[in-house]
Amino acid sequence: MPAGFYFNSLSFVANLTLFFVSLRYYFYVKKALNPYLILMIATSFLWNVALFFDMIDFPLSIALLSVFFILFGSIPVLMISYAFRFKVLYFFEFGILLVGSILIYFFLLSKADLVFLGILSTLNVIFSIFFMTRKYTDIISFFARSKVQTYIVFYGLFEALEVIIFWLWIYHNGMWPYISAMNSILIPIYLYTIVNLVYEIRMIQISKAFLKNALYGLMISLLISFILIISYYTNFYFSKTSSLIQLFSISFVVIFLSFLVFGDYLQKIDEFFEKILRTGRGYKREKTINFVKKSLETDSLEDLEHLIVDYASSVLNTEDIELFFKDDDGNYRSVKSVLDQKEIPCGDILKIVDLYSLPSAGIFSGKELLVWMKNAGKVEGFMVLGHKKSGRYSSEDLEWIETLSNHLTFFLSRYRSIQRVVKIEKQMIFQERMAALGKLSSGVTHEIRNPLNIISTSIQMLRKGTDPNQNEKLWKYIDEELARINSILENFLYFARQKPPVVEEGDPVEIVKKIALLLRENASKRSIEIRTSFPSPFIAKFDKSMLMEILLNIGTNALDAVEEGKWISFEVEKFESYFKISVSNNGKAIPKSDLQRIFEPFYTTKENGTGLGLSIVYNYVNAMGGHIDVKSDENQTRFSIILPLEVKA
């Protein structure tokens, strides 16, 4: 048996296997109900049967091969037209089948030349590729466009080869046994690829790099081979030597194998030009790394939105992109709008949704892609992309969109955690404020209740009393307690008002001298020494009334804390960017348990104290951007107020 018999037998078994696989998917899986795929695989049996007949010189082999070439060039086009609703191309192919049938009929009757069939087959392939290419540019949906592009590539390459084989068979080329054996191997490979495309399955994993090299090698080898044919005819015209088929076959095989072996060097050349021209994967990879670095430095959706638009403009050639974050209430928020779950036109089953494939895109009408972002199966948000500035989204674009969505998923997950922490902090601050308000209210109530009781008792006694002297004392008590209530309320207002500082230029030393002078009169009555230590006069920017209130409160407390014969010290120090005022005394030490509470509202150890003096001091110091330190031991108690030389208003 010749070698072609074994190649044809293996081809028949492979085609039969693919036929049953396609039947199984058609009737049971029903993912893509396209009957023309089954007819296409069945047509391949004509090739196998015709070759078997040709080996035994059975006359019917010529008719079978003629029918095969016509059907195998038309049925794939019918399959594509049926899938994508290309009505013009669909009816055109039926016309080709009708004309082909007539030509085959006349050939069988008259034994005419098959040249007309060859011309018909060639024109059919050219027109089909031209029509599908035109339709490809009109399709909006990326997924449909990507599929049509794949069909065009595989159909165009294989059918162009089949037309060449058809012409070689018509002219009874001497290399026909080798060419037919090669075609017997290629037909199952072609059918396997089409089955994968139609039913979206992968029965055998093939390296993408190898497939890319093989396709490049096939296309460029065909091109170079045709160039060599032109060279051959030029050479033949002058020397009348060499064999066309021999030259074509040898050059095709050598060049094809060369590309398989050295195809990786083409990728290195591509990367070299990408770096120079700042295009392609190298440039996009660099932009992606920069985007990731910058996005890790921001916690704001507004800032991230600007980064996304800049990235999409550089890498995806579009600025029409919007990011939506799913909040804890189930709504989707972007910088521009808030969407309810019901407003989203699709579910989150598919990660990348082609909006043009939906019956209605709803509020996203005019957009092209919706990309869901999930973390551990939980939706973090999604982004919506509009049209590119020029062209359509490619499979490479989808890879970069996938990369972008993965990083944005991480960002949104981190953003959600930050938002929850901020929310908890706000709740804690609110609770602390409410607790402080409750404490303030309780303190004010407690402080006012005693004077009110005295006033109430005095009024009752005035109603019953007749003694003028006693009545006069009672009215005096009422006046004193009213003044006390007024003082409590004024201190409370001072504390609660939290007014901003009124900044003006002045010399802090003059303020301290004034406070020391005010306290010296009362201090001298109890033999208390007022000590001062001042630097040279200097100018600072601060709130004079606040500083006077601070020093008056601290000085008054110091005067109450020291006994007769002791001292109070006021000291001012100037530094490069701040100044410090220290008020010290050698009176009773503040207990350590009280040091942490002396600035709390209404906390006091005095019988008649309101507990608001040091709270006001603390607020005023903070308002001017400073801080206060307190140290107390058996030797002395020191309050140190540190304020900037230029307080910000």
Image (spheres, rainbow, N blue to C red):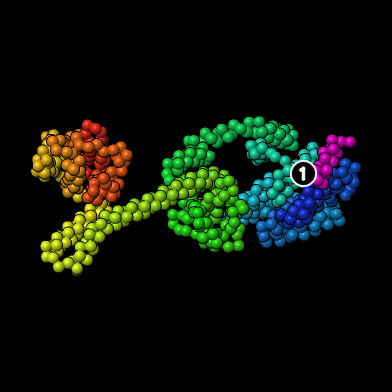
Q: Is residue 24 visible?
A: yes
Q: In screen coordinates, is 177 left or right of 553?
A: right
Quadrant occupied by the N terminus: top right
Identity, as a three-letter code, of the amino acid under mark 1 = Pro
Percent position of residue 238, x then y: 68, 34
Number of residue marks: 1
Q: Give the residue number, with chain letter if any, for mark 1.
A: 188
Residue situated in front as seen by the camera: 526 or 614: 526
Q: Quadrant of residue 175?
A: top right
Indicate the secondary structure of the residue bearing disc 1: helix
Residue situated in front as seen by the camera: 281 or 240: 281
Percent position of residue 388, x then y: 51, 52
Percent position of residue 500, x then y: 24, 51
Residue 456 lies in the magenta stretch: no
| Range of residues picked out in magenta | 1-17
Percent position of residue 50, x then y: 85, 46
Q: Is residue 167 visible?
A: no
| Residue displayed at 71% across by 34% down | 253
Q: In screen coordinates, is 230 left or right of 301?
A: right
| Residue displayed at 11% across by 40% down | 526
